[in-house]
Amino acid sequence: MRTIAIFNLKGGVAKTVTTAAMADCLAATHGKRVLLIDADQQGNLSQYFGATAEEGRDLLALLQGANEPYYPDFVTPARPDIDIIPADMSLMYADLDAIKNGRCNLTAIEDLREAIAEDAASPNTEDWAKAYDYILIDCPPAFSAASTAALTAADAVIIPIRLDAFSTSGVAELMQQVVNMRRANERLQVAGVLATQYQRTDVEIDTLALLAARSGLPVYRTTIRQSPRVSAATFAGESLLTFSPHCGAAMDYRRFVCEFLEQEGKENG
């Protein structure tokens, strides 16, 4: 089981869309079972999958819990082979608790990951609990308590990015912050930078080449084209891959997941 955080300090770079599309593709196309964690207080990933952050059964409850997590208490079934731990605006209380009284457990997601792994290895565990192949965490564009807990638990980070001046200029700072997080999680790696909302302009082509050559970061070969069908699928609350399977973005996300899995196979083979 691998834990992947989708993270960028810049907003509007398609973190949530990337998380959702990865989950849908991993489950529907590649037969993987995915646990999603919505670590953004906006709760967009939860809304996309129709999951309500009920009191005591969401990420806030997990972060505030003092005991070892019993993860079925927090998991909401979303789609076939996809479950989610939802969040909403109440997640901001995790930051307040961390500041005021230290109630926020920044190792809660890591503890959850370990509990799932232990249960999966047990011969007495129900079949459904053995099957998580990936935990995907949709992070907010900030170093909040939830994103810190996510990076503490993650094996790797995927960085969606728009190829504009403001987004690319923040990559060096982001990398430094990820390096700093390795003090708490030494296994954390950057899986790659994923260019999203790509229109193949001359500026974007040059920026992508520059990013690959000079940033020192792994950059995915696949780029995700800009498509109005992404917003339409979001409004409909449906998987982009089934709502508009032949649009450019849907086809690109399929290619990206294949590239991601190829990379995973090389690193774990």
Image (cartoon, helix red, strand yellow):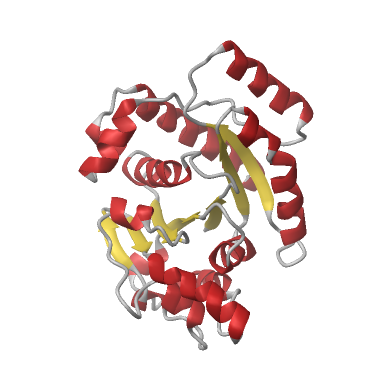
**Where 89 falls versus 190 (above or below)?**
below
Residue 167 on image: x %, y %: 61, 36
Q: Position of residue 187 (x, y in %)?
A: 71, 58
Relative to 230, is 50 above or below?
A: below
Q: Which residue does the image show at 76% across and 58% down from the upper left?
A: 180
Left or right, 244 with respect to 142, comes to left
Q: Name the foreground residue: 256 vs 121.
A: 256
Q: Specify whether 175 is left or right of 264.
A: right
Q: Is residue 198 in view?
A: yes
Answer with the quarter of the image where residue 130 lies. bottom left
Which residue sits at x=47%, y=36%? 257
- Vertical position of residue 40 compared to residue 16: above or below: below
**In the displayed structure, would residue 236 be above or below residue 245?**
below
Which residue does the image show at 38% across and 46% down from the upper left? 20
State the image quarter where residue 60 is shown.
Answer: bottom left
Res. 122 in view: no
Q: Position of residue 175 (x, y in %)?
A: 73, 46
- Front position in the image: 128 or 199: 199
| Quarter placement of the C terminus | top right
Q: Is residue 85 left or right of residue 160?
A: left
Residue in the foreground of this view, choosing between 97 and 146: 97
Tell me how many marks there are.
0
Residue 34, picture quadrant? bottom left
Q: Residue furthest top?
A: 202
The x, y position of residue 119, in whole percent, is 46, 75
